[in-house]
């Protein structure tokens, strides 16, 4: 039987409340917590809810992106998660990260406001960053390396 939008709203509110206490390790953990609260859920509904709520998967689990942030501090926080940077063509930088950390690194880059970044895609352990130019690519790699060194 399809769930109502009221069920969905209640489920999403509960997910936000759970994530407000810190990262939740797995989707299955969320399913257990929500079921314990009397909500009818499946892993696929939780997966959709996490996506629609804008939750991100980090090394610690699923969490909501911070609203009040300082881009420079955020970049320093994710710098230890970066394993390497490699140019790929003139306008693409490939960033290898710790397993599960790519989305967090991609989000930090999005929030940086650096003008050489056109956009990025974060997977599990790899971020592809499109840059405005070859010099923008080199500048971005340099900024990332400086953040890693500090």
Image: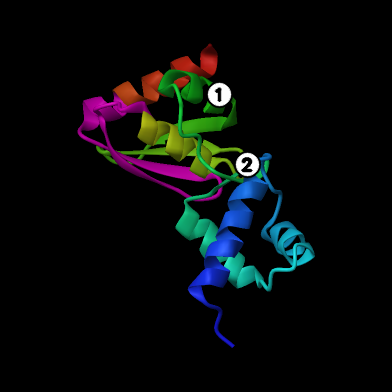
Position of 81 relative to 25 (above/below): above
Q: Nearer the viewer, residue 142 or 121?
A: 121
* Residue under the image location 46 percent in, 59 percent down: 52
Q: Residue beneath label 1, please?
A: 77
Q: How far apart are marks 1 and 2 (CA)?
A: 19 Å
Q: What secondary structure is marked by label 1? A: helix
Q: Which of 74 and 90 is in front in this view?
A: 74
Relative side of 105 to 31, left or right: left
Residue ranking furthest to the front: 6
| Numbered-mark total | 2
Q: Give the range drawn in magenta.
A: 112-138
| Quarter of the view holding residue 28 | bottom right
At label 2, counting other C-alpha atoms closer than 10 Å, the crowd grade (few under 14, some 14-19, many 20 or more) is: few
* Residue under the image location 74 percent in, 57 percent down: 29
Image location (x, y in percent) of residue 77? 55, 24
Image location (x, y in percent) of residue 8? 54, 68
Image location (x, y in percent) of residue 62? 62, 48
Q: Residue beneath label 2, please?
A: 20
Q: What secondary structure is marked by label 2? A: loop
Residue ranking furthest to the bottom: 1
Give the mark nearest the N terminus, 1 or 2.
Answer: 2
| Quarter of the view holding residue 98 | top right
């Amino acid at each position: 039987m399809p769930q109502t939008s009221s069920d969905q709203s209640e489920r999403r509110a509960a997910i936000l409340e759970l994530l407000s206490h810190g990262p939740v390790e797995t989707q299955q953990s969320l399913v257990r917590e929500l079921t314990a609260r009397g909500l009818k859920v499946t892993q696929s509904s939780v997966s959709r809810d996490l996506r629609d709520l804008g939750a991100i998967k980090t090394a610690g689990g699923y969490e909501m992106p911070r609203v009040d942030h300082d881009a420079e501090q955020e970049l320093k926080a994710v710098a230890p998660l970066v394993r390497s940077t490699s140019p790929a063509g003139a306008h693409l930088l490939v960033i290898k990260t710790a397993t599960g950390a790519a989305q967090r690194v991609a989000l930090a880059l999005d929030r940086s406001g650096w003008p050489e970044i056109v956009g990025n895609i974060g997977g599990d352990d790899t971020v592809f960053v499109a840059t405005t130019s070859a010099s923008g690519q080199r500048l971005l790699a340099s900024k990332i390396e400086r953040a890693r060194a500090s």
